């Protein structure tokens, strides 16, 4: 098995069944995993901010940093490898209120809302999610099984 590590503002796509795509320590960031069981194509996006209008230069240099540029990039990258939208299984985690106990900045909440708006406009259904609250999460997409596992801070690994 080969681990593909997805950093912050990063994306990884694969069609190799022995790959495991992992992103660690999702706080206010959102992790979106997609998997097409027919094409055997999967991907994982770890985006940091909701809207590329915050910094157009950063969005151009690294579209995976923002929901509105990273999510389309995730899906289009999978389509390029043979995936089809109607078959894609979508799982989501993150959007926590870490270091923001007063909920002043609401970055996690804004990230969740940006994702939901994009999915709603594009008729994309979420199979399962673990979002909000105030703890970090780690996501693993195991390509061999097409399954997503999540671990919360100090918790057990469970299927999402």
Image (spheres, rainbow, N blue to C red):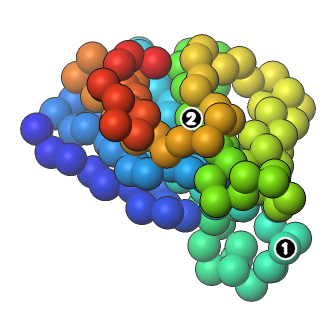
Is 141 located above or below residue 110 in the figure? Answer: above
Point out which mark residue 148 bears.
none
Q: Residue at x 46, y 18 (%)?
A: 160
Quick one: SS at disc 2?
Answer: strand
Q: Nearer the viewer, residue 29 or 145?
A: 29
Residue 78 appears in the picture as rendered? no
In the rendering, at what x and y percent does residue 99 appear? Answer: 64, 59
Q: Is residue 140 visible?
A: yes
Which residue is at a point 23% across and 23% down the rendered structure image?
144
Hey, which residue is sitting farthest front in the picture?
102
Task: Give above or below for 27 relative to 54.
Answer: above
Pointer 1: what residue?
54
Q: Gap in Å between the C-alphas at discs 1 and 2?
A: 23 Å
Indicate the position of residue 119 as horizontal and vertical percent values: 78, 31
Give the residue pinned by disc 2: 93
Measured from the top left, where is residue 35 in percent x and y? 46, 26
Q: Residue furthest bottom?
A: 57
In-front residue for pair 148/105:
105
Image quadrant in which the N terminus is located: top left
Residue shown at 35% from the left, 19% from the top: 158
| Quarter assignment of residue 20 | top left
Does residue 66 sit above or below 30 in this rendering?
Answer: below
Q: Is residue 120 left or right of residue 15?
A: right
**Circle 2: is it few (<14), some (14-19), or many (20+) Cα within 10 Å?**
many
Residue 43, how many percent across, how many down? 45, 40
Residue 51 image-quadrant placement: bottom right
Relative to residue 31, is residue 149 drawn left or right?
A: left
Give the mark, 1 or 2, whose residue is nearer the N terminus. Answer: 1
Label 1 SS: helix
Residue situated in front as seen by the camera: 132 or 100: 100
The answer to whether 153 appears left or right of 4 in the picture is right
């Amino acid at each position: 098995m080969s681990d593909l590590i997805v950093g912050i503002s990063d994306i990884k796509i694969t069609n190799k069944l022995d790959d495991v795509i992992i992103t660690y320590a999702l706080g206010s960031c959102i992790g979106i995993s997609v998997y097409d069981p027919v094409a055997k194509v999967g991907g994982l996006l770890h985006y940091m901010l909701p809207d590329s209008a915050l910094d157009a230069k950063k969005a151009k240099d690294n579209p995976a940093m923002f929901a509105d540029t990273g999510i389309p990039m995730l899906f289009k990258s999978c389509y390029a490898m043979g995936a089809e939208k109607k078959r894609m299984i979508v799982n989501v985690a993150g959007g926590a209120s870490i270091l923001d106990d007063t909920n002043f900045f609401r970055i996690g909440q804004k990230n969740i809302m940006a994702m939901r708006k994009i999915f709603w406009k594009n008729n994309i259904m979420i199979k399962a999610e673990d979002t909000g609250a105030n703890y970090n999460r780690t996501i693993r997409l195991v390509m061999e099984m097409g399954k997503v596992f999540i671990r919360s801070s100090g918790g057990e690994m469970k299927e999402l």
